[in-house]
Image (cartoon, rainbow, N blue to C red):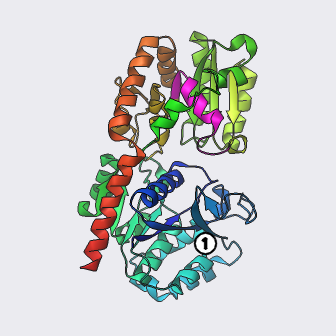
C-alpha cells in the first residue's frame, strides 16, 4: 500500500499556490495510483494565524474542516501561549530531534515562524511506525517542515519537501533557516534557477534536488463559459453599464509589496495617461499597505478598480475568479517572490498574455516577448509601459496568449506534475526498502 503523509502549512479554505499544489497532488495520486494520503495541518486560514491567536482559523464545525473534495483533513490548533523557551525545550527533549542537524538559532526561528503544533507531534510519536511509506511537506520557512523531519526520523521513512524557496526575497535568505533543507532526503524545486541557487549558493547536493514545475487544470478555463454563463459574465456583472467595453487588467495573489500589487497601484496613473478606458481587478488577500495605497490612488485618479478578497470567493475555482481570467485582456503579477507563479499558468490556460517581473524564477517561466513581458521589479513606469503596449495591440495579446496556452498544454498540467511526483515517490520508497 502507498500510504503517504502530507504536511502542508495550511490547507483549503486557505488559498495559496503551495497549498493548492499539495491539494491537487493528493487528489490526482489517490484517484490514479491508489495512494492513501493522510493530510495533517494547522487550522490556520491566513498567515497571521500561524503565530497569532488573532489570526483567522477554520472552526471544527465549519464546512471543509474535516473533508475537502473527498480527502480527509486532520487539523490541529497552534499553541500560541507556551513561552518560546518552553517550546524549544519541548523540541529538544524529543529523541527524534537529536538526529536532525540544525543549529539552536535555526530551531528558534522555525518555532517563532509557526505554526507550533505539539499535539500533532505527540500524536505521531504514538502512531504505529510501519504504516507510512513517505512524508511530503511544504513550504519554507515554517514549522511543519521540522515536524516532517521529526516524524520521518521516528518512522524511518524518506522525507520530501517542496520549499517554494523565494530566493529573490531578502527575508528568506537566512542561512541558519536554509540549513534545515539539507536534512530532507529530497527537495522538489519548481525551476532550474531555484535548484541552482539551492545547490551552488547554499551547498545542497544537486542529486538531492529534483525539478518539477507547477501545473494548471487548463480544461476548466476552456469550459467556464458554458451554456449557463454569458461570454462576458464578469464584465457584465461588475463593470458599470456604460463601461462594459472597457479593457481589463487582472492581478490575482497576495496583495503586498513582494507580489507587486502595490507597484501595480502606483503604475495606474501612468497607464491612465495613455489608456483611460480600463478596469483594474485585484483578487486575493489584502494588506494594510495595499489598502493605504489603494486609498491614495482613488484620491489621485478616477481609476476603475475592483477589489476582491477571499471572503468574496468560494474557492480556487470561484466563478468570479475563473471568468475574470477568461475575460481579462492582460494578466499582471510583477512579483519578486514567486518560486514559480501558478497564476501565470492560469492566465495562459485562459489564452491571455502575462506580465511578470524580471526577478527570481519568473524569467524561466515567462519568455520575454514570446508569451509575455518581463518588467523591472517595483518600477511603476516600466509596468505601465508594458500594460499600455498590450492594451493597444490586440494581435500582440493574442500571440502571447496562444503561445502561453500551447506551453501549458505541453508542459504545465497537474497530470504531468502528478506523473513525475509518483515516480519520485516510488524511487525513494524502494530505495529505503532495499
Of residue 304 and residue 229, the one placed in the foreground of this image is 229
Question: Could you tell me residue 181's position as x and y percent?
Answer: 39, 66
Q: Secondary structure at mark 1?
A: loop
- Residue at the spot 49% in from the left edge and 30% down from the top edge: 222
Tell me the quarter of the picture where residue 3 sits: bottom left
- In the picture as drawn, the residue positioned furthest to the front comes out as 227
Of residue 174 and residue 341, the one placed in the foreground of this image is 341
Of residue 164 and residue 220, the one placed in the foreground of this image is 220
Tell me the quarter of the picture where residue 412 sits: top left
- Residue at the spot 63% in from the left edge and 28% down from the top edge: 281
Q: Which residue is mark 1?
A: 116
Can you say whether 353 is above or below 152 in the image? Answer: above
Q: Is residue 325 magenta?
A: yes
- Residue at the spot 47% in from the left edge and 25% down from the top edge: 352
- Residue at the spot 61% in from the left edge and 35% down from the top edge: 321
Q: Name the quadrant of the C terminus.
A: bottom left
- Residue 406 visible, this orientation: yes
Tell me the quarter of the picture where residue 408 sits: top left
57 left or right, relative to 416: right
Question: Could you tell me residue 86's position as x and y percent?
Answer: 62, 83
- Residue 202 visible, this orientation: no
Can you say whether 254 is above or below 385 in the image? Answer: below
Give, as a single range, the part of the protein colored magenta. Answer: 314-331
Question: Could you tell me residue 117's position as x and y percent?
Answer: 60, 74
Q: Name the quadrant of the N terminus.
A: bottom left
Q: Is residue 50 magenta?
A: no
Local crowd size for mark 1, using a 10 Å CA cut-off: few (<14), some (14–19), many (≥20): many
Can you say whether 358 is above or below 108 in the image? Answer: above
Amino acid at each position: 500500500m502507498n500510504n503517504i503523509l502530507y504536511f502542508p502549512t495550511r490547507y483549503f479554505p486557505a488559498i495559496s499556490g503551495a497549498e493548492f499544489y499539495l491539494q491537487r497532488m493528493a487528489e490526482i495520486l489517490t484517484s490514479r495510483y491508489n495512494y492513501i494520503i493522510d493530510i495533517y495541518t494547522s487550522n490556520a486560514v491566513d498567515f497571521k494565524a500561524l503565530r497569532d491567536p488573532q489570526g483567522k482559523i477554520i472552526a471544527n464545525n465549519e464546512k471543509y474542516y474535516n473533508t475537502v473534495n473527498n480527502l480527509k483533513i486532520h487539523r490541529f490548533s497552534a499553541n500560541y501561549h507556551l513561552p518560546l523557551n518552553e517550546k524549544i525545550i519541548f523540541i529538544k527533549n524529543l529523541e527524534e530531534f537529536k538526529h536532525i542537524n540544525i543549529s539552536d538559532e535555526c530551531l528558534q526561528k522555525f518555532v517563532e515562524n509557526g505554526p507550533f503544533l505539539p499535539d500533532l507531534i505527540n500524536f505521531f510519536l504514538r502512531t504505529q511506525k510501519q504504516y507510512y511509506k513517505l512524508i511530503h511537506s511544504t513550504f519554507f520557512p515554517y514549522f511543519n517542515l521540522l515536524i516532517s523531519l521529526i516524524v520521518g526520523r521516528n518512522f524511518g521513512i524518506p522525507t520530501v519537501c517542496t520549499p517554494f524557496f523565494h530566493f529573490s526575497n531578502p527575508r528568506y535568505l537566512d542561512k541558519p533557516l536554509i540549513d534545515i533543507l539539507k536534512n530532507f532526503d529530497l527537495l522538489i524545486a519548481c525551476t532550474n534557477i531555484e535548484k541552482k541557487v539551492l545547490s551552488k549558493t547554499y551547498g545542497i547536493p544537486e542529486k538531492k534536488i529534483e525539478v518539477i514545475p507547477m501545473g494548471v487544470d487548463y480544461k476548466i478555463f476552456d469550459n467556464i463559459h458554458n451554456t449557463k454563463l454569458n461570454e462576458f459574465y464578469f464584465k457584465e456583472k461588475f463593470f458599470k453599464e456604460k463601461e462594459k467595453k472597457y479593457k481589463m487588467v487582472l492581478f490575482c495573489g497576495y496583495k503586498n509589496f513582494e507580489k507587486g500589487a502595490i507597484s501595480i497601484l502606483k503604475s495606474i496613473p501612468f497607464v491612465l495617461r495613455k489608456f483611460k478606458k480600463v478596469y483594474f481587478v485585484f483578487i486575493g488577500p489584502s494588506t494594510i499597505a495595499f489598502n493605504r495605497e489603494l486609498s491614495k490612488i482613488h484620491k489621485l485618479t478616477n481609476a476603475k478598480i475592483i477589489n476582491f478578497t477571499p471572503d468574496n470567493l468560494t474557492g480556487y475555482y470561484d466563478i468570479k475568479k475563473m471568468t475574470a481570467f477568461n475575460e481579462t485582456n492582460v494578466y499582471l503579477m510583477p512579483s519578486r517572490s514567486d518560486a514559480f507563479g501558478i497564476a501565470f499558468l492560469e492566465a495562459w490556460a485562459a489564452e491571455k498574455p502575462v506580465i511578470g517581473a524580471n526577478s527570481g524564477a519568473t524569467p524561466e517561466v515567462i519568455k520575454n516577448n514570446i508569451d509575455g513581458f518581463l518588467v523591472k521589479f517595483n518600477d511603476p513606469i516600466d509596468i505601465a509601459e508594458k500594460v499600455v503596449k498590450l492594451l493597444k495591440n490586440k494581435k500582440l495579446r493574442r500571440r502571447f496568449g496562444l503561445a502561453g496556452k500551447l506551453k501549458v498544454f505541453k508542459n504545465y498540467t497537474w497530470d504531468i506534475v502528478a506523473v513525475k511526483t509518483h515516480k519520485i515517490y516510488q524511487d525513494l520508497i524502494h530505495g529505503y526498502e532495499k
